[in-house]
């Protein structure tokens, strides 16, 4: 039996909903992602895993900065110091941004780091571990560019190219499976989408268009475990063999607020593979929706709704539905003060959605302007008037908060 730690979608460098930590100089959300990565490695090393498999998307984008690269390299060095080999599959966030340029994890291959395998093209690998060899069919994120430059497909439609690419990938998996040693445990590592998988908020940050493979195409004979990456929601799409997305290690945004984040511990064995999901302590994202339109004391109604939640260390947003008269009485500063008192880690947004006629869309803004409207409140009212999507509104307001805080800190 070979013990395997299966991780995916680390997205080191995502820095929304946070601030610079004065003690380290690093962004607090970067520290979140690194803490989850460390937590997963702690679990794996404590379990005595024989191999760590990372199924793609190491960084938030294809051009990570030196700090992000340094922090990832430190953790790879920790695994190698423990004698644990590492298998890194490239994902859509890892591939080269243009022809001729190195991809984000190619440095490990260039330095020929012992015990670190970078799989950036379809290939059958054999990895030696202290518990014995493992066969890995690597299917990283694939692009259409290589096919589109072929003369025979130069005039092909997008659909024809799509069908041809899928045919070639299916053929690669089938051919590789036929080459497997039937007595050695085998894994198929794939960064991409399997038909039937439940997708989520990762669609908002996907670089490139998905090519979907069927479960039948990947569940080939002699394959004992299918290690997936790319989709952030943990899920299992089959048990014979197990077809598993571990999900991402940390929450990206509010679209993932109800998803558990974690990693997968695998006991790899011919015809008898077992696995279990390990939940990581991802930062909570809490959205509080309050309708005060039938309340005589809207401020108290909001306060009571906030008090029902444990907000310590959470990223929080509050969305209030109110009449025009109630909106004039509601004080955003009071709501924010209560969130601070509740030890919220970060206030993503306080949105007061005003019920009003289209003709009177800017009436509230005009009244508040006379009373001394803040720039942030002006932006908020403008976004509400434009019926901006709540997720986008939260992101824009968060960016505004950072700019305002930076201006205040510079004394401008």
Image: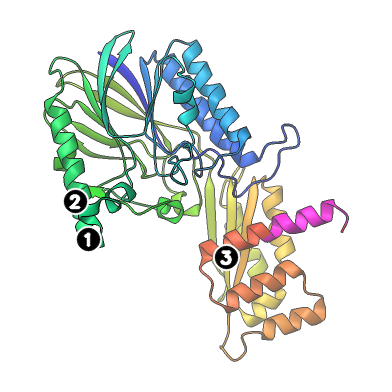
Expressed as whole percent of the image width and height from the top left, the position of residue 62 reads 49, 43
Q: Secondary structure at mark 3?
A: helix
50 lies above or below 236: above
Q: CA distance from mark 3 to mark 1?
A: 41 Å
Packing grade of label 3 (10 A; few <14, some 14-19, many >=20) is some
Stretch of the chain drawn in magenta = 400-411
Asked whether disc 1 touches disc 2, contact meaning CB atoms under 8 Å apart, the reply is yes
Q: Looking at this view, name the residue that lies furthest to the top.
A: 130
What residue is shown with label 3?
393
Examine the image and state in which quarter residue 159 appears: bottom left
In this rendering, which labeled residue sits more in front, label 1 or label 2? 1
Quadrant including the C terminus: bottom right
Asked whether residue 315 appears in the rendered view, the answer is yes
* Label 1 packing within 10 angstroms: few (<14), some (14-19), many (20+): few
Query: Which secondary structure, mark 1?
Result: loop
Q: State which tag comes first along the sequence, 3 or 1.
A: 1
Q: In this figure, which residue is indicated by the disc labeled 1? A: 156
Nearer the camera: disc 2 or disc 3: 2
Sequence order check: which comes first, mark 2 or mark 3?
2
Residue at 58% across, 34% down: 68
**Horizontal and vertical percent for residue 197?**
27, 48
Residue at screen point 53% across, 75% down: 387
The residue most toward the front is 151
Q: Residue 183, how many percent across, how many down?
A: 14, 14
- Residue named by callout 2: 164
Q: Is residue 356 above or below residue 129?
A: below
Kindly identify which numbered label has been placed on residue 412. none
Residue 190: horizontal and vertical position, in percent? 29, 37
Q: Looking at the image, is 156 positioned above or below residue 49?
A: below
């Amino acid at each position: 039996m070979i013990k395997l730690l299966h991780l995916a979608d680390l997205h080191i460098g995502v820095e929304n909903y946070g601030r610079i930590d004065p003690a380290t100089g690093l962004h607090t959300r970067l520290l979140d992602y690194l803490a989850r990565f460390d937590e997963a490695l702690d679990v794996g090393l404590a379990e005595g895993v024989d191999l760590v498999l990372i199924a793609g998307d190491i960084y938030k984008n294809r051009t990570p900065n030196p700090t992000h690269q340094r922090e990832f390299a430190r953790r790879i060095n920790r695994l190698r110091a423990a004698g644990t080999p590492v298998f890194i599959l490239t994902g859509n966030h890892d591939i080269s941004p243009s022809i001729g340029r190195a991809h984000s994890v190619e440095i490990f291959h260039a330095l020929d780091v012992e015990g670190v395998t970078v799989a950036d093209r379809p290939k059958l690998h054999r990895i030696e571990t202290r518990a014995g060899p493992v066969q890995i069919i690597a299917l990283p994120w694939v692009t259409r560019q290589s096919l589109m430059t072929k003369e025979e497909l130069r005039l092909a439609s997008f659909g024809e190219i799509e069908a041809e690419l899928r045919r070639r990938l299916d053929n690669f998996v089938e051919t590789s499976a036929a080459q497997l040693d039937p007595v050695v445990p085998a894994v198929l590592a794939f960064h991409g989408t399997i038909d039937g998988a439940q997708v989520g908020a990762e669609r908002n940050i996907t670089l490139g268009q998905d090519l979907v493979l069927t479960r039948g195409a990947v569940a080939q004979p002699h394959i004992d475990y299918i290690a997936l990456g790319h989709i952030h929601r943990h899920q299992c799409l089959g048990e014979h063999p197990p077809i598993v997305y571990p999900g991402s290690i940390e929450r990206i945004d509010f679209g993932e607020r109800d998803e558990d984040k974690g990693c997968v511990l695998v006991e790899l064995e011919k015809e008898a593979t077992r696995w279990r999901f390990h939940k990581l302590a991802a930062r909570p994202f809490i959205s509080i929706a309050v309708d005060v339109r039938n309340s005589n004391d809207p401020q108290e109604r909001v306060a009571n709704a906030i008090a029902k939640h444990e907000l310590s260390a959470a990223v929080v947003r509050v969305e209030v539905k109110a009449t025009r008269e109630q909106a004039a009485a509601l004080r955003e500063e009071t709501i924010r003060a209560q969130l601070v008192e509740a030890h919220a880690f970060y206030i993503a947004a306080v949105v007061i959605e005003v019920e009003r006629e289209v003709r009177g869309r800017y009436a509230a803004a005009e009244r508040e302007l006379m009373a001394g409207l803040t720039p942030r409140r002006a932006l908020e009212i403008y976004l509400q008037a434009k019926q901006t999507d709540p997720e986008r509104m939260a992101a824009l307001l968060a960016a505004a908060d950072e700019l305002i805080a930076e201006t205040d800190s510079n004394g401008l």
